[in-house]
Image (tube, grey):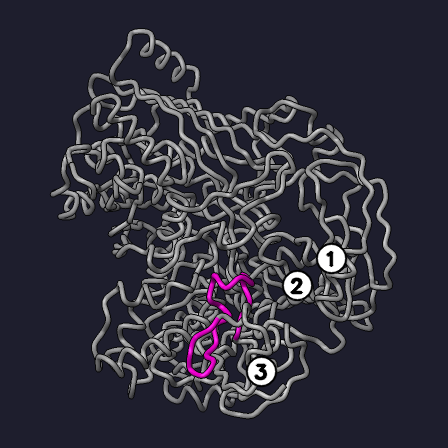
Amino acid sequence: MKITVNGAPAEADADPDLPAAHLLRDRLDLTGTKVACGTGVCGACTVLVDGTPMASCLLPSAALREREVTTVEGLGGDHPVQRAFAAEDALQCGYCTPGFVVEAAAFVDRHRAEHGDVAPDRRAIADAMAGHLCRCGAYEGVYRAIAAACEGRYDDDPGTPARVDAPDKVTGRARYTTDVRLDGQLEGVIVRADRPHARVLAVAFDGEAALVDLLPEDRVVRYAGQPIAAVAAATYDEACAAAARVRVRYADLPATTRPTGEGRPIYAEKDRKNVHNASEGFSMPGKWRGNMRGPASLLSWRGGAAVRRIAAAAERGDPRLVTGEYGTAVQVHTPLEPHACVARWDERGDLHLYLSTQAIGMVAERAAARWGLRPEQVHIVADHVGGAFGAKVQLGVEAIAAAELARAAGAPVRVVFSRAEELTDAGNRPGTTTRIAMLAGADGELKALTMDTRADGGAAIGSVVAGLARLMYGTAPRRLRDYDMLTNLPPGSPFRAPGGPPMAWALEQTVDEMAHRLGEDPIALRRRWDGNRRRRVLYEWAAELPVWRERAPSGSRTGRFRRGVGVAAAAWLYALTTNAQVELTVEGGVVVARSTTQDIGTGTRSVIAEVLREELGLPEDKIRVEIGRSGTVSGPPSLGSRATTSVGPAARDAGRKLRDALGPEFAERPEKRLVDAEGLRVVGERARDRGGYLVPISMHGVGVGRGLSGAVQVTEVEVDTRLGVIRPLRVWAGIAAGRIYRERLARSQCEGGVIQGIGYALYEERQFDPETGHVLTANLEDYRIPGIGDTPEITVRFLEEGWDHVTGGGIGLAEVSTIGVAASVGNAVYNATGWRPRHLPIRPDRLLQGLKGLEGMGS
């Protein structure tokens, strides 16, 4: 097949029906073209065909014959759009970025030809980029970049990249696990259960491909989609054909797909030690009764007093008692780079894993333990990671299957989840049902709180939701109980601020309702109840926003389109990796920084580089950051909002040590001194916080520091009362997390947190077949995440004061930025309509039914 690719003739031997994306990636090694959804929804695979943007995952290779194809590599790296995306920080993990860049380049060229150097409005940009998704939520940067490129601001000015890896990401040079191709590499496919609960009696295979077993010891599958085995073949299609020849004989067991706690237990007592965990590695104790585990109530405070006060208030009909039941749907992580691993065993018996992971060090330890290897025999590479959000912490089945297949086949093996697998068995935020009761006294102070949450984590335990209400609103008595309601559905796992958003959905709407009962401003009530001095500053800021001061009384608006404003607050634990280190070596006149950590789009590379530039006073080309690999000093995982607060101070300590080691000559002639100091090595460490930590003993290097991060979010929405559509217009996010290392990157993190919170509030909902347990929302058409057109205008206000005791002065912010968003949307909907949403997502049918109920009551 003859085609012209990036201005040069090319020939490729390919099946005409092969998707063009695979032709470009696998045959021509143009891996900037990403495949994320396979159904033309996400836009990551966009290329230009005769100048027209097309989704190459849907385009057959035959359609490229005798045509000119331009991929992101063909834009050359100096197109104004590429410069603008890098300078305006229109990216985070970067997996979706090549597709955005290709589409944006075509749009900018066309817009300028028609309109001159004039920036289009947000609506025009959103329409142009409507076929693209960014799970990180970097849309605000995309708006800025496209507007700036249309104005011609980057025609002659290359700009300064906001991230050190931005040039690689906007050109397609950045290599992700899905892009790895080793000599002799095979493709692996996982065989999965087709029923929700059964004992596997036999697995038969009549093929010649490598086959490995992935079943647990008890040979029981507990959800449809659970891995049973894996096969490998020369190509993905051949591996799929081999997988179809695997025959599994089952003995069906009773299945439970509704979180009722009834039915035959999913886990026998002897198997409970192997149950999946939906939290970040810890579980509060709780008794098992059938398929229910709980209550876990260690975080209660004077729970008995809370129950007595609320019972007495209910008996006397106290109007200051607010009760309610709130529900949330299962939310799926769905990073655009799916779970992926390439494994090979070398001649020494060492294991090499190219892995999309957010926890290189942790996974290396677990891999060594699983395969009986010494730590130095496990080598992990994660140069670039296309998003994670908590889903890529463990030694997952993709790595286990790839490693076992590689050993069985004697060749490297790549295993990449399909989008259906990613949306089924890659983790999720458990759904919840929460019953809450809140009592205020005659003086308007909080007197008691009870909160019971039943979590639908599928075949997983450990969900903590109600317990997180201990972090908010002082020390009034509170009984906080968490239950796990196990079902034969895919297991939950940690998801950005595990338990935080569903807790805030119930708590913050109840506080809002209490403010209305007391006739008090919702911000003023929170400021009075909340003893956190940092959040008080944010309350004062939020109260002075014109949109807040000018809002109408709740439910007072009429007409089809009604605007409303809501507020919510949030808190999160300050966690860190106490043994984080950064090593610096002088190599070829360049300072090279290394640590066993990774950058999943949060900017860890750039934070390290920025700190070293500040300490050493060197230009950018004299500092190189090499992370994403094991085998060096210990670094933090990218979870729990602890990467930056851990690695930033370690990099600063390393910079100071290197400067001291280079001596006074370094200040006078730095580049000459670096040449003379070839091979010099120092290791920086994160010093202990002043006053120590909240928990004196760290577990696996994880510490809990003193103080809570805080957030206050104000959201304005427009409600279409005819169609039931809610449109977020603007969000103001106040974030109290101490020193900001890289302001633009921190702002992007918080904007992304807001956008994920909006998805949780309005769109995201896993659906399944209750009879078979199969996930029905197994593609990005049926499972809807926010697009650029769903993005409100976002203003972020950082409060940096108040963390002087913290080494480095700053803590994590990625999780606290998303916790209260959905609740602020719910409160805004109430302000607009007088109807209070109780269940997430706030779908049009739920809104219309709620408004109909108000009309029936004469409201």
Please give left or right for residue 407 compared with residue 617 in the image.
right
Residue 418, located in which quarter of the rendered image? Answer: bottom right
Three-letter amino acid code at the position of disc 2: Cys
Answer few, some or many: residues within 10 Å of disc 3's Cα (few below 14, many 20 plus, some between 14 and 19). some
Quick one: 611 or 500, which is closer to the camera? Answer: 500
Please give left or right for residue 202 compared with residue 39 in the image.
right
Answer few, some or many: residues within 10 Å of disc 1's Cα (few below 14, many 20 plus, some between 14 and 19). many
Q: Residue at x 32, y 64 (%)?
A: 127
Is any part of residue 178 visible from this angle? yes
According to the picture, the residue beneath numbered tag 3 turns out to be 679
User: Where is residue 545 shown, x and y percent of the image?
Assistant: 16, 48
Q: Quick check: is 305 in the magenta stretch?
A: no
Quick one: 48 or 453, which is closer to the camera? Answer: 48
Three-letter amino acid code at the position of disc 1: Ala
Q: Which mark is residue 341?
A: 2
- Residues at badges 1 and 2 in contact (C-beta under 8 Å)? yes
Q: Which mark is residue 401?
A: 1
Of circles 2 and 3, the one toward us is 2
SS at circle 3:
loop
Q: Which residues are magenta?
A: 33-54
SS at circle 1:
helix
Label 2 – label 3 distance at C-alpha: 33 Å
